Image (cartoon, helix red, strand yellow):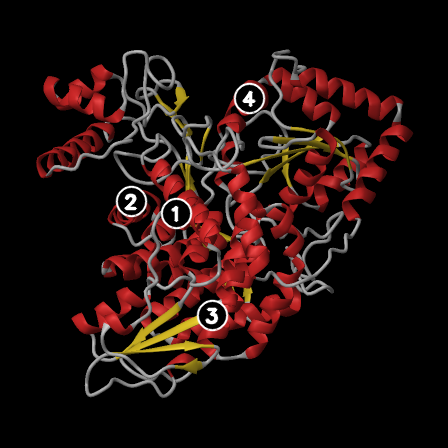
Amino acid sequence: MANRLDAATSPYLLQHKDNPVDWWEWGPDAFAEARQRNVPVLLSVGYAACHWCHVMAHESFEDEATAAQMNADYVCIKVDREERPDVDALYMQATTAMTGNGGWPMTVVVDHDGAPFFAGTYFPDRPRHGQPAFRQVLAALSQAWRERGEDVRATAGRVAEHLAREVTLPSYPIDAGRIGAAVEALAGDFDPMAGGFGDAPKFPPTMVLEFLRRAVATPGLLDDERRRQAAHMLARTTAAMAGSGMYDQVGGGFARYAVDRGWVVPHFEKMLYDNAQLVGLYARLGTEDGERVAVETADFLLRELRTPEGGFASALDADSPVSAGGPSREGAFYAWTPSQLTDALGEERGWWAAELFGVTNEGTFEEGASTLQLRHRPNGADDLRRLAEVRARLRDAREQRPRPARDDKVVAAWNGLAISGLCDVGRRTRRPEYVDAALAAAELLERVHLQPGGRLLRVSRDGAAGQHAGVLEDYGCVASGFLSLAAATGDPRWLRHATALLDTALTGFAAPDGGFYDTHADAEALLARPRDPGDNASPSGFSSLVHALVEAHALTSEGRFRDAAERALATASLLAEKAPRFAGWSLAAAVTLLDGPLEVAIVGPAGADRDALERRALRLPGAVVITAEGPVDGIGLLQGRTAVDGRAAAYVCRGQVCERPVTSPDELPDGGWADG
């Protein structure tokens, strides 16, 4: 059997290269093979850190009998959803339309034109909990293909027609009234007991929280009641997540989501896109606890996800071996029993830690183990010192355990998010090593991912670029990352790169109504051209590009960037009105536009005075704050800006109209917020 996955750049595909399944990568050759053999195509979509993807692989794809059935009756294609988000988005839309829900692994059976006639997610190796066995599904679909081909093709055609249907949405501005209505709608979904929105499972609502932060801190935007609601939702949720089992209380960083309403038990994989966003959110809170979480999370990113080339790997797996050479289990690296705590810390400190972290004899997770929670952080100096010592010793003890696997591909979009987040925490905490790490990641993207003509490649691994073109989220997130770096360093090179990417996006991804498609006009033609302005675990390509356009306008004074952002935001108004939980990043951009946006240029010699101005200016909600020694050619916001009498000065502008420069932080507006 030809091994078609052994040259893949995707660690997920490489995990399957030794399966007895005759896997193909996505491409025309696989569909030509299916047409020649007159068999359907089985499409299996997942990602390297996915727990249930591993379960299905072990149960079915590593099983000789199941593989033989798959090889005989199908052409089998394996897709990494993180490498091909366009393919994933298209067939996830089909899966949710056909079944009412979605997830990974995603299992779709399609005809020779790629039109789906069956879709599902995980299937067990034997009938279980009302689900048929995977081999039963395979047999039934193969039989239907052979014996009822016309019906199958008719079903596929109807689904393809549904997927290709263009929907025209109303377009109107997101004004202050709609911002208030979004806050009210979010309050209706808010969990007052545990924080967050809705019931289990609970994902970090990072973009919604940033919208609430900006709305609360923008004077006059909300009435008193809406402001109180927004501040409470923000404070309650950020505190709940920071003290939860979803946050790694030993090593920093957040797991992907919590399986329960109370944030006790996470789904343990750690994703770059989550942590890259959360490090910035907690830094921007401007609180002591927020700064602590931001620093711990930034340290996790640098310690565990940074690659030798300077970029950031995509994820850490949820599973790891219980012992060297033993079977893997979800959460094995992170969970503790009371006896394990006392083994690592000694009797007295072990029981102190068990009480502090909520580790019980019964366990809060599986097999008597518990996740670590820190619902009530100690206040006294002695207890805080003891906590730091306990965390360090537990981290050392945990390092003796087999580590989770790492998906070390570098995704352009998520590295763009990491650059922005690290610039945020570095500037706000005065830790230049984080900005240095952001710079190294940007230089990797510049060296490996950037192509002539302002084009981007989506992934690289070990410093070598993959073949897949960037999608809209790559352009938006990388442009934002470069703009963050330009603002942090005053280096116009990053502004030039960012505006080149935005120019490509405005021409290659534009939709007729002012919004954007998720793929470039010259990308591979699928059944439909994906387009989804809704945020998920990370910002949509749409909302990330809008943010980049707003930031570029502030730094360059070029009105075309603002015009494009306003036209695009108007196409998301219905989403923001009907489903604000999926429009948080668009709503945050709308707040910023309603406030000007606020632009602050800080110029003057490096030192304590400039640092104080910068820290105060960075508290302003949604403000674009750039710092430099003086005017810089190629950066409009810095033109004509000079120090005042040799002292660092801050120029506060709205819409390119500036107030007189100030030299004291107390003369800057107050951008704080409080839980009202």
Label 4 neighbour load within 10 Å: few <14, some 14-19, many 20+: some
Which of pointers 1 and 4 indicates the residue nearer the eye?
1
C-alpha span from label 1 to label 4: 37 Å
**73 sits left or right of 50 in the view:** right
Q: Which residue is mark 2?
A: 293
Q: Are marks 1 and 2 in contact (CB under 8 Å)?
A: yes
Q: Which residue is mark 4?
A: 62
Mark on residue 605? none
Residue located at (33% from left, 62% from top): 619
For the residue labelled by badge 1, is the local secondary structure a helix, a strand or a loop?
helix
Q: Which residue is mark 1?
A: 278
Q: Which residue is mark 3?
A: 597
C-alpha span from label 2 to label 3: 28 Å
C-alpha span from label 4 to label 3: 55 Å
Residue located at (66% from left, 20% from top): 68
| Number of numbered tags placed on the structure image | 4
